[in-house]
Image (spheres, grey):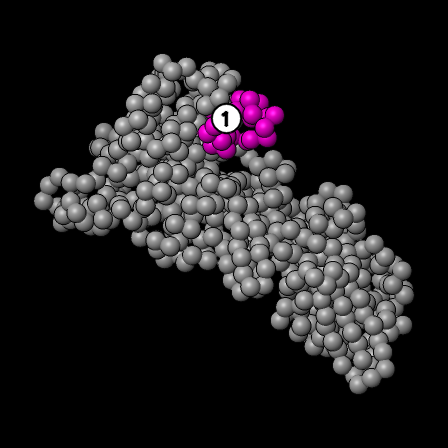
Amino acid sequence: MLSVGLVGVTGHLVEVEADLSAGLPAVVMSGLPDTALNEARDRVRAAVVNSGERWPNRRITVNLLPATLPKYGSAFDMGIAAALLGAAGELPLAALDGVVILGELGLDGSVRPVRGVLPMVVAALRAGINRAVVPLANAAEAAVVPGVTVKAVETLHRLVAYVRTGGALLDPPSDHPPPEPPMLDLADIAGQAMGRRAIEVAAAGGHHVALFGPPGAGKTMLAERLPSLLPALDDDAALEVSALHSVAGLLPEGGRLVRRPPFQAPHHSATLAALVGGGSGLARPGAVSLAHRGVLFLDEAPEFAARALEALRQPLESGRVLLSRTGGTTEYPARVQLVVAANPCPCAKPQGDAHCECTPLARRRYLGRLSGPLLDRIDVQIELMPVTAADLFVTSGGGEPSADVAERVAKARAAASARWSAERWRVNAEVPGPRLRQPPWRLPPRDTQPLRRRLDSGSLSARGFDRVLRLAWSIADLDGRDRPNVDDVDEALALRTGGGRRFDG
């Protein structure tokens, strides 16, 4: 029988072999099974017997090929049961040639859903297999993969009847998934013109953002509305993101593809494994991978554990997470837009008067929990001022809605995509710094003079220099220019060094 094993979100075709021989009755599993797979012998035996089939009273050897690939989970149960019944002469398995079989068996013979069916079916298709039998609860998820004929079963008995007598398998449910809830709108933001501009530039170029300011300034509201400015995911990105959510068991109801850029906002008590992924055996994706092609928002960022924050440095640069465990290495994509928000001090009371109880040293220590190397990887760093009464009670015009801003962002991204299409970069934030410092993309010295002075004085790192250049290109794309000018560079420099860490008393 054919099945699929997952390592991270990468699927590998697995052949399930069963052999019956003389000897003491026993079931031996081989092929690097994990604990859940080793326990399949008991689940399969009960499911076969309770489905009305005869259990062979012989020595049974089940092997999963390739034997060098670690196998995890219970998705092999149905394949093992079918192979075993075929080896016993109970089933003519010709009807299942070239068919991938996935599903966990209950003791009563029911077929239970499993995680990761979407990337499993994708892997089968890439291996040349275009037919799949999956649990009924996973059928809608599997059916979104184009080019694959998906059938479903809810019991082992239905699969046996199909092979033995030509009984009918089930089609994926045709129910329409419920509509997605409306997204938050940027028009809800009161004032904060600089914050709105920063979020727009970040959306246009895929840049990371750090928002600093007092409580109630709108840091969280701005971060939560960033996904409403991002374009919908294309087919490749949607399949990639949906595969990650399938592995984590978080696919939307109805099994539809994830088309909206995901938004992850873990609590500040989140552990290192919760942020970047982990766990025993097969490492599960963390928040940074579940936010792939979307937004990872860390509210109250200084309250996160230092180890968890520092672990984000490598994924922010490479766009992937590599998790090494004793059982092997797992890789997950992690191309995210990071947004961090922080209050000016631990007490978070108004500054500059008798309300704040924190000393200047306490304020520096608090924001110092966000290390320099981490902040250096964040393109936009701005300080938000308190909202005024005039901003709150504006009666006409109000803030620009997300739909209008998203239209400009889409045009800017289209311009960047066309410019970098030969290099396969999607947004300006992905362009390597050396590429922007070489012809034909190098800007004239008169436009980069402020950057050069800051670099020579040590107030701007080489990485910061390149990130300002990327911001300048995003600003130019938003404004419809084919190249940045000195004003774009000045605005980019202001967004990069806009007072994000000036809460030092």
Looking at the rendered structure, the kind of residue marked 1 is: Arg
Left or right of 41 on screen, residue 393? left
Query: Residue at the spot x=38%, y=50% of the render?
Result: 309
Left or right of 342 on screen, residue 87? right
Left or right of 315 on screen, residue 421? right
Query: Residue at the spot x=34%, y=33% of the render?
Result: 461
Q: Is residue 322 visible?
A: yes
In depth, the one of 52 and 316 nearer the eye is 316
Query: Residue at the spot x=86%, y=82% of the render?
Result: 22
- In the rendered image, the vertical position of residue 353 relative to residue 457, given as above or below: below
Tell me where the magenta segment starts and ends, as one range. Answer: 414-436
Left or right of 81 on screen, residue 356? left
Q: Which residue position holds label 1?
A: 435
Q: Is residue 423 magenta?
A: yes
Q: Is residue 468 magenta?
A: no
Q: Residue 36's image quarter?
A: bottom right
The secondary structure type at the circle numbered 1 is: helix
Main secondary structure found in the magenta portion: helix
| Crowd around label 1: few <14 · some 14–19 · many ≥20 (10 Å) | few
